[in-house]
Image (tube, rainbow, N blue to C red):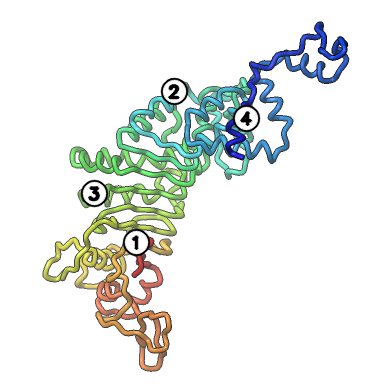
């Protein structure tokens, strides 16, 4: 069937010509009747361009067929193809543009082009009092035109500023590649008055409004780490501006996995990016923070404002065991896990590093933990309950209790033998192994 399809040659629209109504049909010398419906259709379609004929043919198809055709076209990874199709008609533009803007990555090479068309433009003024007619915020299900936004090219009253602003509001996943991109982004919103000082960023629409996630790539943190000591207050102030640009439920911090940064770089980044702090968003709770990091030292969660934390350690590191008491500077995974757990949950005279963790944080999951750090035992002794067919490590919690799940050794030792505290922390902290590998 495939071979037959390959041999079958489709005739393009340019190769189709109208029948000559003045000539004989070749059958009995009879001429073709000009009243036939087929001839009328051909004459009708002769008025249109190939593009317009294709559009009419598409419109005549059932909705499920059209949906399948678009699904196949948009599944092609070539953005250039999608852009070419988008520019063929207003209808195609309206259909494809939300797909293209669904996920946007900004870097130092495309950030200026992203703002092309609105440089130097100002938000629209209200005709009555001259004040800025700024679109209010709202749930994503509210039609954009009901809050003063539109990207449709056939609406002449929509300015290029509002059109670009609306397109930015279509973004679901935003990726910022490097710090220079972030600086240019802040400069653009200042030039174009996209944000006003003391503007309520929850009530009014911001540039990237209610997006699913914003990702900061490793280059962003490499740049920050390099220049942080030059003017720390300046960079802290710059980072704080991020919440004047976005409203997001998920923050993804991709610290470089092949280089360990200054501890201060980790702390400042998580402190600022892990908690909304602009006017109108101060008390907002994020849904999730995802942190990719080669180490746990410097990953402090004491100031974050979110429900869930997912930390992904570098799965390629050669983690070795280490006695932290004799080697306090040890960077083994076991030592880092103990320090991380102690400073977030263990309150004590001997623990000078305690910083605590906000009550809003419901769960902390650490991924790519070595199997021996996840092994469930107590005081370093493995014990398997005789009636446990699953081979789970169990031990009685007290004399009157049946065998119950035991704690990971690293968790129990981090809590310095406080059994009740260790069990309480165990409900909030989850140690996960590398996907696809067994314990």
Q: Earlier in the sequence, mark 3 or mark 4?
A: 4
Residue 129 visible at all:
no
Mark toward the viewer: 1 or 4? 4
Q: Which residue is mark 1?
A: 434
Q: Which residue is mark 2?
A: 116
Q: Residue at x 86, y 9 (%)?
A: 29
Mark toward the viewer: 2 or 3? 3
Q: Residue at x 28, y 70 (%)?
A: 373
Q: Residue at x 72, y 33 (%)?
A: 61
Q: Position of residue 87 (x, y in %)?
A: 56, 23
Kindly state the secondary structure of the residue where label 4 is placed. loop
Image quarter of residue 301: bottom left
Q: Which residue is mark 3?
A: 258
Image quadrant occupied by the N terminus? top right
Q: Which residue is mark 4?
A: 8
When the figure is inspected, residue 147 is found, relative to residue 10, above or below; the finding is below
Image quarter of residue 111: top left
Q: CA distance from mark 2 to mark 1?
A: 44 Å
Q: Report the front residue among 438 and 101.
A: 438
């Amino acid at each position: 069937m495939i071979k037959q399809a390959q041999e079958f040659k489709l005739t393009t629209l340019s190769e189709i010509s109208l029948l000559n109504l003045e000539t004989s049909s070749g059958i009995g010398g009879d001429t073709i009747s000009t009243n036939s419906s087929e001839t009328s259709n051909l004459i009708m379609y002769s008025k249109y361009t190939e593009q317009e004929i294709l559009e009419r043919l598409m419109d005549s198809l059932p909705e499920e067929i059209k949906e399948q055709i678009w699904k196949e076209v948009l599944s092609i990874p070539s953005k250039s193809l999608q852009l070419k199709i988008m520019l063929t008609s207003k209808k195609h533009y309206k259909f494809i543009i939300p797909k293209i803007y669904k996920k946007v990555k900004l870097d130092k090479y495309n950030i200026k082009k992203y703002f092309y068309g609105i440089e130097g433009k100002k938000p629209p003024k209200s005709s009555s009092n001259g004040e800025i007619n700024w679109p209010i915020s709202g749930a994503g299900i509210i039609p954009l035109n009901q809050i003063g936004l539109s990207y449709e090219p056939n609406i002449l009253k929509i300015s290029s500023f509002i059109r670009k602003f609306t397109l930015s509001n279509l973004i679901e996943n935003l990726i910022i590649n490097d710090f220079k991109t972030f600086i240019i982004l802040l400069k653009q919103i200042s030039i174009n008055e996209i944000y006003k000082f003391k503007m309520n960023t929850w009530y009014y629409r911001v540039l990237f409004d209610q997006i699913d996630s914003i990702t900061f790539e490793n280059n962003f943190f490499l740049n920050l780490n390099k220049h942080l000591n030059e003017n720390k207050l300046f960079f802290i102030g710059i980072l704080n501006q991020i919440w004047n640009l976005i409203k997001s439920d998920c923050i993804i911090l991709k610290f470089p996995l092949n280089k360990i940064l200054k501890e201060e770089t980790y702390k400042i980044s998580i402190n600022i990016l892990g908690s909304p702090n602009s006017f109108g968003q101060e008390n907002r709770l994020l849904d999730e923070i995802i942190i990719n990091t080669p180490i746990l030292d410097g990953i402090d969660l004491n100031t974050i404002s979110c429900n869930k934390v997912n930390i992904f350690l570098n799965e390629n590191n050669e983690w070795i065991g280490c006695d932290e008491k004799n080697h306090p500077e040890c960077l083994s995974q076991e030592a880092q896990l103990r320090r991380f757990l102690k400073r977030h949950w263990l309150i004590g005279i001997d623990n000078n590093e305690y910083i605590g963790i906000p009550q809003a944080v419901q769960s902390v999951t650490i991924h790519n933990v070595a199997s021996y750090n996840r092994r469930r035992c107590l005081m370093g002794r493995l014990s398997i309950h005789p009636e446990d067919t699953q081979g789970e490590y169990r031990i009685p919690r007290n004399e009157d209790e049946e065998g119950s799940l035991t704690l990971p050794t690293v968790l129990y030792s981090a809590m310095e033998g406080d059994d009740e505290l260790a069990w309480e922390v165990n409900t909030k902290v989850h140690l996960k192994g590398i996907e696809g590998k067994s314990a």
